[in-house]
Amino acid sequence: MPDLPHLKRLEAESIHILRESVAECERPVLLYSIGKDSSVLLHLARKAFAPGRLPFPLLHIATGWDFRDMIAHRDATVRAHGLDLKVHTNEAAVAAGVKPWTHGGAYADLMLTEALRQALDRHEFDAAFGGGRRDEERSRAKERVVSVRSGHRWEPRAQRPELWHLYNFRRGPGETLRVFPLSNWTEADVWQYILAENVPIVPLYLAKPRAVVRRGGQWIAVDDERLPLAPDERVETLSVRFRTLGCYPLTAAMESEAATVQAVIEEMRASRSSERAGRLVDRDGVAAMERKKREGYF
Amino acid sequence: MRTLLRFITCGSVDDGKSTLIGRLLADAGRLAEDQREALVADSRRYGTRGGEIDYALLVDGLTAEREQGITIDVAYRFFATDRRSFIVADTPGHEQYTRNMATGASTAQAAVILLDASKGLLTQTRRHSHIVALLGIRHVALAVNKMDLVGYSQARFEALVEDYRRFAADLGFKSLAAIPLCAVDGDNLTTRSPHMPWYAGGSLLEWLESVEVEEGRAGAPLRLPVQAVLRPHADFRGLAGLIEQGTVRVGDALRVLPSGRDATVARLMVGETNVPSAQAGESVTVVLGQAVDAARGDWLVAAAEPAATADGFEATVIWMHAEPLLQGRTYLLKAGTRTVMATVSPIKYRLDPNSGERLAARRLALNDIGVCGLELDAPIPFENYKDNRDLGGVILIDRLTHQTVGAGLLHFALHRSQNVHWQTLDVDKAARARLNRQRPCILWFTGLSGAGKSTIANLVEKRLYAEGHRTYLLDGDNVRHGLNKDLGFAAQDRVENIRRVAEVARLMMDAGLIVLVSFISPFRAERRMARALVEAGEFIEVFVDAPLAVAEARDPKGLYAKARRGEISNFTGIDSPYETPEDPELRLDTAALGADEAAERVVGYLREAGVIGG
């Protein structure tokens, strides 16, 4: 009998991780960022528990600066599958006037990291599924599938050894888990799976003419009228797509004509920049991600 | 169709492992432009190549590692060619991180073992090869690196390979390829080297793309550990799990283990889709045609070729925690989807991972590998690790800290549990208790030497006796004269001491007695073990609390003085720890209470708890 193709292996492994987590945790939650990884994760979770409903809710950390298309996609997905969606925003930070361009690196800490902690604490979730992959970034290469956080912090030196596919879900008071079912996927795997399984994704991943402005050498979408423009900035309409999605003022677009998933895959094959190049938050220093992870960012 | 190969790279600290992987990722996996820019910047800042591109920096991720210039954790790396997708487990070369190597090896199908051509076989090379073999990897590439340092010498290469083949002869590798390399320059890494025309073989990448690691799992008898029972509505009951071995088809006759009930496959699903069959490596949902009981932790197996079940095993244990493994200690054991309690029975030997030699041992320290017995509190289905790594591999978890403290590779059943039945007797504990007009229990007095345990226990027994109750007092010193006279005071002996006493106390309690145990019993783990032997409410922990200074001042047997003079070692409170009970049923503060008052408290507690009548 021939070996299983690698996408089937990855799918089976992720479903196994999702089922183990639900069996061994009391209050799991799926962190739903509406991005392509989250969409694949949701698709896998629905497969894992079919024909039943998802045995856990979705949590979206909203900043108020999400692309409008993301919110539309989120609401349509929730309706289509009858999902239980929780939305949380760090209201205190919003009230304090925190905006994507006002606080530098602290913006992500406040609106994502801190907001996530607040939401996990409020709902007393003991395990949170994330779409993180080990190929994304150097510090993630050492992340476990099941990662223990004490008071939400990640201690790289205190990680449990993880052998075969036996995952240790035991946790003490004050400890929570982050679970990464897509650990062993690459960006290319995610795209190929989206194509093979026809996974619905936000249209922003596909190229179309959009209003953008040149800023710091990158294209930033003018998704609504709140984006302040400098006197010398000029709004242009270009065919662009996004490789990752986050707060629109902080997410760079790339010029592209790839209007289908197939075209995106072909373009990526020829591409010369990695996925996180479009994410401005990651650009502050060599150890940025390691530090963010230690503080509880996903 | 592209397949997946998971492999591990290992070698000593300076063999050039990080450079080899970094270069493999950059050359075969095509480094993105922004990553190359970052690498160039990092090379200037942290590099060890005088500002030139240092490929090792691609894989040395954590800030702590950069600062120390070493790799401290398993990192997983990804690249793909048209033929295969690769997952690389990059594992540390330092001896103290053996546990990480075992972790990386546990999921790898092939290994690349690095050797520095200028240095030859090192202790680490042997150690890593032993671990690779132990964890069940059967396909190995010996990457003889730094050939530039030996002038690309064919003679040197062949001598090293000969050395290694002789060493590895009994490690059970099915295939062993040797490749001369210079990773820094890319020679024989992804393309053939112009410097070594005498080498007729392929590059390392060619080997990785073509090595056959077919495990034949799809053709073996079905093994499917149940993860969950899916019950979305009353008409559907699906057993969800990953097929670890074999193939399952609609209509197949299956057996549920350990219960042994048979059923047939009525329906098989992957996600929401019905499928006629599925093979090893797939996550499926099975609907059985008969209403047989099956739950998480059970196995679905081929009815014609079922797996064995057992509650005791010989196993190789790789210890992964600073707190050592001790004989008699009880841990949680996770096997597949089932978690049980496992007690460590005698350690047979420890392996010297450098030589493979067997050494006598009574404990396993961090990074030790040894063979011991594991006695479980319930039978589990299993396979020998040699036959199937995912079914024969188990992890040990500390019950208090929840850390994964060890990995176990199951060899064989020590006794087939289906042949051993607990003898059911007609006169039971309840019947004896009625006759005695008391509820049997264990009163466990713990505390420092000189705290007053024996004095108080003795007074309690006198009062109970006076009221006509049937009791027995097990005293630490007395038991050590007989039953436990073969045991000393080292940690592993203390563990065994308590295990025996706990078992004796349980038998006496079963006989209907109120058993008073007066033992220092310094470790929480053993007190928990004793508590776990009996039912809830039957174990009453009495903490006889005296500060060390008070106990030492009393020193009724003159032992503290001796310990202070160094005449006796491992003395609790002096050079061996006492772990204070966290939640005892009773705490007696003997600095404030007299012995009579303390005994009265205990008797009062027994009355309130209904152990003895009002």
Image (cartoon, coloured by chain):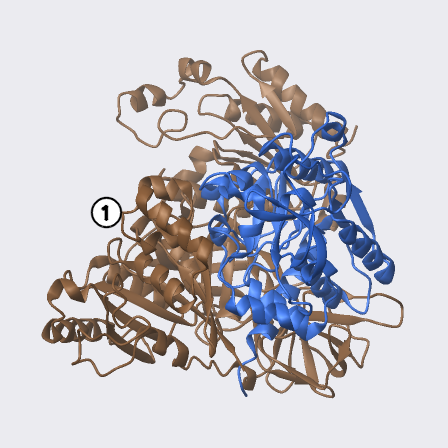
Chain colours: A blue, B brown
Q: Is residue B415 visible to the viewer in this orientation of the structure?
A: no
Front residue of this view, candidates B276 and A98: A98
Residue drawn at (84%, 72%), measured in percent from left and top?
B236
Amino acid type of disc 1? Answer: Gly
Q: Secondary structure at mark 1?
A: loop
Above or below: residue B275 compared with residue A79: below
Q: Residues within 10 Å of mark 1 (few under 14, many from 20)?
A: few
Judge from the rendering whether residue B153 lies leftward or rightward of residue A37; answer left or right.
left
Residue B326, percent across and down?
42, 48
Above or below: residue B422 compared with residue B284: above
Residue B364, percent across and down?
37, 50
Above or below: residue B541 compared with residue B205: above
Quarter of the image with the C terminus of chain B is top right
Q: Quadrant of residue B210?
A: bottom left
Front residue of this view, candidates B140 and B136: B140
Judge from the rendering whether residue B166 lies leftward or rightward of residue A40; answer left or right.
left
Q: Quadrant of residue B267?
A: bottom right
Residue drawn at (41%, 18%), measured in percent from left and top?
B556
- Which residue position is annotated with label 1? B50
Front residue of this view, candidates B171 and B381: B171
Front residue of this view, candidates B297 and B480: B297
Residue lying farthest right?
B234
Chain letter, disc 1 residue: B
Residue B610, percent across and down?
76, 33
